Image (cartoon, helix red, strand yellow):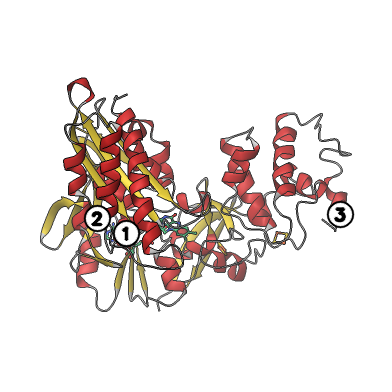
Amino acid sequence: MAAVLVSTTVNGDAVEYSCAPRESLLDVLRNRLGLTGSKEGCGTGDCGACSVIVDGRLVCACLMLGAEMDGRTVETVEGLADGATLHPLQTKFLEHAALQCGVCTPGFLMASKALLARNANPTEEEIRFALAGNLCRCTGYDKIVRAVSAAAAELAHPAKSGTGKKTGGKKAAGGKATGKKKG
Amino acid sequence: MRYESPKTTKEAAGLLAKAKGNAFVLAGGTDLLVRLKSEVIDPDLIVDIKRIPAMQGVTKTAAGFRIGAATSCAELGENAALKKAWPGVVEAATIIGSDQVQGRCTVVGNLCNASPAADSVPAMVAAGAKAVIVGPKGRRTVGVEKVVAGPGKTTLKKGEVIEAILLGKGGAKTGDAYLRFIPRTEMDIAVVSAGICLTLGPRGIIKEAKVALGAVGPTVEIVSAATKVLVGSTLDEATLEQLAVVCSAACRPIDDKRGTIEFRTEVAGVLARRAAKIAYQRAGGK
Ligand SMILES: Cc1cc2nc3c(=O)[nH]c(=O)nc-3n(C[C@H](O)[C@H](O)[C@H](O)COP(=O)(O)OP(=O)(O)OC[C@H]3O[C@@H](n4cnc5c(N)ncnc54)[C@H](O)[C@@H]3O)c2cc1C
Ligand code: FES
Ligand code: FES
């Protein structure tokens, strides 16, 4: 089994790795690059917990080979926050309690990011359709949908996000991470 | 297992032809990698076709459209000209799976996976799509219906790879449509499906018609009796009744957890009726 040598860009950084030809991108991210944010829920494209963005498109990392990545660009949940400042999607997921166990969350965040990149102001229906490839066993989805709407609003008007929650915009984000545990 | 990503179709065909053991083409991988993971297949060679320029993107040709075999279904949905000319084909291609699956999957992979429930296949068959096949003996072009031999089986020979799908120009007098029945609203496999393409002559009279049903037999069912019923009509109520009858009669489905024989047979007629109405309107009929 000849190893494949791959040069790629992960969250903006040039990365090189060698992997087995049948290794999935998900296994490469988790086991070789230490990026364990992307989860394996099913390994067959059904749950979306492994969602990442490759060359600008949302994909399931479990349905790509690590070997396919040469010269391509991948964005994972680890690249979402800007240093200690969480992305508005992350902040809104916390504020709206859009997660419980959290296994599905990295996938939902990446799918939501891809959605907002092509549709800055989605309707509830559009959000539900766009997130149909992501499964959550805990939240019942409503809170996730509300969080995505709120993040869209926040991204459109960063200064005065009007979700009724106490918002600190960028500043509060880091501290909030421990603030809410129950959904 | 070896992984290769050739730059030309000829190179890909050469690798496949020379391969010892199991060799597979990798397009989007949304079927292949699931089978690899579940150890249904144990490939010795995987030939990734996504680095072959001739297999990328949708191009307009003198005869119509050429869809490179490595073009994702999401890209088909983003192509305004293709969507305008062949809305049924594009709808069928963009109904597959989730956004994640859409970003990878291809209509050629859908075709070559040879599932009786493959969504894009009835729509492509109805629209008269052709497959450009490249192999050790050169190049040949066949109707897409000729590619599928049965569940999970194609007629492709060793060393053959599909380079592109060809579609005609479409036009103001031609309209196509695709509908499937699934128990959910998305992320499910068709229980029954219908693809229809109609071309109208003067006064809204149907001049040409092709009806293809999915998931009601081992391969797509082309209903020639439906063509006879439709041609010469203006899609009045009696014609629609008759269309449903002949479509149901053409079904040879199986009973499984997704649907009974009785259900599939009945719903095939219902979907054919509804798809015919949409196709007729798209062809400029009223
Ligand atoms: C979560 C999920 C949901 C899905 N939902 C649907 C659905 O709603 N409807 C549906 O129809 N399908 C569905 N599928 C199945 C699958 O996504 C489609 O069949 C898809 O179109 C396959 O395309 P691909 O490019 O990914 O194929 P691949 O997996 O790359 O290939 C499939 C087969 O075709 C062969 N092949 C590919 N390209 C060529 C070529 N150019 N020449 C010769 N052989 C080739 C491969 O060797 C392989 O055997 C789903 C799959 C998943 C994982
Ligand atoms: S782990 Fe990839 S979709 Fe479930
Ligand atoms: S929070 Fe547990 S699966 Fe979504």
Q: Is residue A139 left or right of residue A181?
A: left
Q: Look at the image and tell me in which quarter the N terminus of chain B lies.
A: bottom left
Q: Which residue is mark 3?
A: A180
Q: Residues within 10 Å of mark 3 (few under 14, many from 20)?
A: few
Residue B70, can we see it?
A: no
Nearer the observer: mark 2 or 1; the answer is 2
Give the crowd class for mark 1: few <14, some 14-19, many >=20 residues within 10 Å: many
Label 2 chain ID = B
Quickly name the residue at label 1: B216
Amino acid type assigned to the residue bearing label 3 in the image: Lys
**Tag nearer the camera, 3 or 1:** 1
Q: Residue at x 21, y 20 (%)?
A: B203
**Of callouts 2 and 1, the N-terminal one:** 1
Q: Which residue is mark 2?
A: B250
Looking at the rendered structure, the secondary structure element under dot 2 is: helix
Between the C-alphas of marks 2 and 3, the distance is 58 Å
The percent position of residue B234, horizontal first and vertical second, equals: 24, 28
Q: Nearer the viewer, residue A100 or B9?
A: A100
Q: Secondary structure at mark 1?
A: loop
Please state which of the two labelled residues, at mark 2 or mark 3, is closer to the viewer. Answer: 2
